[in-house]
Image (spheres, rainbow, N blue to C red):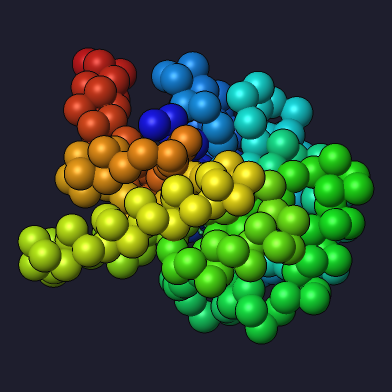
Amino acid sequence: MQLAVNVDHIATLRNARKDVQPDPVAAAVLAELAGATGIVCHLREDRRHINDRDLALLRATVKTKLDLEMAATDEMKRIAIQTKPDLVTLVPEQREELTTEGGLDVKKHRAYLKSFIAELASQHIPVSLFIDADEETVSMAAELGAAFIELHTGHYANLSLMSAAEITAELRRLQHAAELGGKLGMRVVAGHGLNYTNITLFKSLRGIEEVSIGHALIARASLVGITAATKEMLRLLV
Ligand code: PXP
């Protein structure tokens, strides 16, 4: 399984001080140099982390694959067509949420999503739909012309709260959805809430090309970097 790194939280930290550091663009370069196969950023309507400047610079810098997560709005469509990311991942977006809270309601927005996907495809931008791992939704994603599906792993990610039987059932559900997605001609990736513990079982699933990880990876980076950063400051203080 390959790894796409979501750099949103680097921007969150930068914005906490209205500063220029840390820069999500620098983080993306480092993640790519370390072997990430893609960089993900979510441009939200409220620009709470990634902003338009970040997206433009990420587009100019990312060498692997830039995945722009966004809501299916006219504003975002215009930005995507102008920026030309390698992939657009459509996610539901609610103003008050802390992070994306669930998969897209593909059934409800069927006609709208179909024309949205077609318009981006006509501009040579493939679209991934962030969806729950159920048969009906996966089939509908294929009907709508999605090139990729990203399976929502948020339920699986809570495995510490689940029994062994529930974990097995959730993994089976994800496996089934991945196989169905592949059979229907889509490429399958997954993400949300994956971390250094729950990835061990997850990686045994077949047919999932890549995982998209943000929070756990950036959180780990901030801790494993503390020793080096402290030592560097101490050296300056001598
Ligand atoms: N995939 C999608 C569609 C997301 O919205 C997010 C969160 O931005 C992720 C993956 C990454 O989730 P996490 O930050 O929990 O690793």
Query: Furthest-left residue in view?
Result: 164
Eyeballing the image, is 138 above or below 20?
below
Relative placement, left or right, of 231 versus 32 is left
Q: Nearer the viewer, residue 80 or 164?
A: 164
Asked if residue 88 shows in the view, the reply is no
Measuring 52% from the left and 27% from the top, which residue is drawn there? Answer: 37
Q: Nearer the viewer, residue 41 or 219?
A: 41
Q: Nearer the viewer, residue 50 or 151?
A: 151
Quadrant of the frame with the N terminus: top left
Q: On the image, which quarter does residue 157 sit in?
A: bottom left
Relative placement, left or right, of 141 versus 123 is left
Relative placement, left or right, of 130 versus 198 is right
Q: On the image, which quarter does residue 23 sit in?
A: top right
Quadrant of the frame with the C terminus: top left
Q: Residue 115 location in percent, x, y?
A: 85, 66
Asked if residue 87 shows in the view, the reply is yes
Eyeballing the image, is 164 above or below 101?
above
Measuring 63% from the left and 45% from the top, which residue is drawn there? Answer: 185
Q: Residue 199 location in percent, x, y?
A: 25, 43
Relative placement, left or right, of 128 versus 175 is right
Q: Residue 126 location in percent, x, y?
A: 74, 45
Q: On the image, which quarter does residue 48 sit in?
A: bottom right
Q: Nearer the viewer, residue 196 or 50?
A: 196
Q: Residue 15 location in percent, x, y?
A: 54, 54
Eyeballing the image, is 158 above or below 26?
below
Measuring 47% from the left and 26% from the top, which residue is drawn there? Answer: 36
Measuring 22% from the left and 63% from the top, which residue is drawn there? Answer: 169
Q: Disc count in the image?
A: 0
